[in-house]
Image: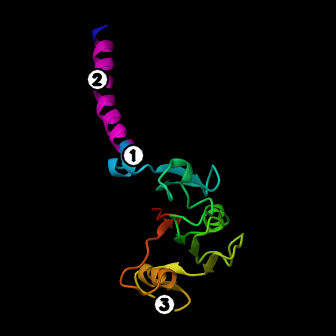
């Protein structure tokens, strides 16, 4: 009797810190208060399974949630540039953003070409590395310059990295 109660109490004590850690970790996915005050929302882009991502989209012109853009192709698109690493056999995420008006630069040294094409999408059979080797790998800085230009005040871009073993 008392042994069973001690075991149960021990389990409850052991599980509480784990549950607290889990809740704290899950709260990391909550948008900051400032973002919520601006009226944006989380939006799933791409397929519901592998290859789809949930991103935070700020409100479009007018600031109304119904006018959230960047995916719908409106002229007020908030997502105008995308650097995407890890193409493999699914580019539904990139394609949806390209249809919405974003310029998408894709990089993957493991495939010869993306499975879908769109005029707003470019593909480079190239890896990401800390140093550049012509036609083999390039740096994030070089790839950013290709997409965004050399301006001292470049536009912002969405960075998607889904490289097996190195996801961000």
CB under 8 Å between discs 2 and 3: no
Q: Is residue 31 visible?
A: no
Q: Residues within 10 Å of mark 2 (few under 14, many from 20)?
A: few
- The quarter holding residue 4 reads top left
At mark 3, the secondary structure is loop
Q: Which mark is residue 30?
A: 1
- The quarter holding residue 17 reads top left
Q: In the displayed image of the protein, which residue is found farthest to the bottom?
A: 134
**Upstream in sequence: badge 3 or badge 1:** 1
**Upstream in sequence: badge 2 or badge 3:** 2
* Residue 53 higher or lower than 98, as above or below: above
Image quadrant holding the C terminus, namely bottom left
Image quadrant holding the N terminus, namely top left
Q: From the image, tell me which residue sits under label 2.
A: 10
Q: From the image, tell me which residue sits under label 3.
A: 133
Q: Give whichever of 24, 3 is nearer the camera.
A: 24
**Upstream in sequence: badge 1 or badge 2:** 2
Q: Give whichever of 81, 66 is nearer the camera.
A: 66
- Give the magenta-colored segment's residue range: 3-26
Residue drawn at point x = 33 percent, y = 51 percent: 34
């Amino acid at each position: 009797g008392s042994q069973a109660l001690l075991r149960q109490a021990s389990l409850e004590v052991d599980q509480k810190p784990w549950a607290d850690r889990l809740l704290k970790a899950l709260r990391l996915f909550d948008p900051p208060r400032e973002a919520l005050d601006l009226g944006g929302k989380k939006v799933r882009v791409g397929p519901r399974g592998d290859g789809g991502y949930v991103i935070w989209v700020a409100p479009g012109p007018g600031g109304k949630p119904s006018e959230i853009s960047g995916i719908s192709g409106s002229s007020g698109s908030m997502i105008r540039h995308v650097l995407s690493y890890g193409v493999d056999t699914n580019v539904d995420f990139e394609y949806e953003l390209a249809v919405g008006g974003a310029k998408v630069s894709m990089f993957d040294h493991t495939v010869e070409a993306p499975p879908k094409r769109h005029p707003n999408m470019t593909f480079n059979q190239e890896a990401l590395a800390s140093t550049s080797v012509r036609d083999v790998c390039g740096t994030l800085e070089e790839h950013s310059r290709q997409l965004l230009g050399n301006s001292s005040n470049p536009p912002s871009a969405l960075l998607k990295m889904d490289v097996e073993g190195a996801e961000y």
